[in-house]
Image (cartoon, rainbow, N blue to C red):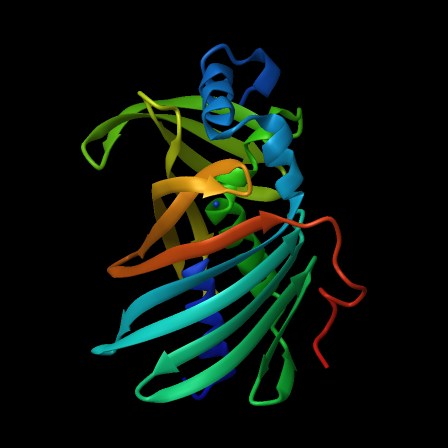
Amino acid sequence: MRDPRSGLLVCCLCLAWWAGPSRADDNPDAAPILAKAVKAMGGAEKLAKLQLGTFKGKSTIQEGGQEITVAVEGSWKGLPQLRLDADIQAGGQSNQVLIVANGDKAWVKAKDQVQDLPKEIAPFVLDLTYALRSPLLLPQLKDKAFQLAPLGEVKVDDKPAVGVRVTHKDRKELRLWFEKASGLPVKSEVSLTDPQGKNVTVETVYSGFKDFDGVKLPGKLVMKVDSREVSLELSELKAEESFDDGHFAKPS
């Protein structure tokens, strides 16, 4: 954990927190799946308020034979702006790490030092959180910029789930599955190139749904990357009306 970028990767994994393409409006199979999910979660109007929001949570990771715990507070504005404040506990030591991603730029602050992160970091962070936050984005997927296609039926936690493939010219392909009975989102999957240049598939399973600010959302996320597994328990998630100037700027 001495290298600030180690903290970055841990935080990313802790969030690190959502067939041929066709137009969403023209697809007779995918659109009803999304409509059912949006209704089950509380409706498009309530979900739309979460374009700006904050959350609090706690995560655990097994790394090198030891358990790492991360208490994290995060905030976001749309898709391109993200801020994570994390307290990482490992080996009896505490590390405070701040990560800010704003468009094509990203920074990390650790031990009172601020670093500009390599240019490949910001896209990785934003594509990852795009997948993890996908349950919050469902109303947006009706926009013509997104193309949808059905993925068929699988089982997630031994329950039937139906899938939708989501493509967008500026985003990685996203695969979503929804519980067939309730309509709630239960799994997302995205293939990324990590900051070390390795191709990885990040699978996230959503469970423990409860009311957050009037919206039914998962209270637990379990992320799997290769043989690594990360769980995130959310204690708070709410919409915000605005953020102070500089909230997503380079840390000082």
Q: Residue at x 52, y 28 (%)?
A: 42
Which of the two residues, 219 or 223, is positioned nearer the viewer here?
Answer: 219
Q: Is residue 87 above or below residue 100?
A: below
> Furthest residue to the right?
245
Q: Is residue 150 above or below residue 200?
A: above
Quadrant for the C terminus in the image: bottom right
Measuring from the top left, give residue 88's x and y in whole percent: 42, 77
Is residue 73 among what the camera can see?
yes
Relative to 177, is 214 on the left or the right?
right
Measuring from the top left, give residue 117's x and y in whole percent: 61, 74
Q: Is residue 33 above or below residue 55?
A: above
Measuring from the top left, give residue 183's x and y in whole percent: 39, 24
Q: Residue at x 35, y 73 (%)?
A: 69
Which of the two residues, 125 or 135, is positioned nearer the viewer here?
Answer: 135
Measuring from the top left, give residue 191's x and y in whole percent: 42, 48
Relative to 2, is 145 on the left or the right?
right
Is residue 146 among what the camera can see?
no
- Residue 190 image-quadrant placement: top left
- Residue 200 image-quadrant placement: bottom left
Q: Residue at x 40, y 71 (%)?
A: 70
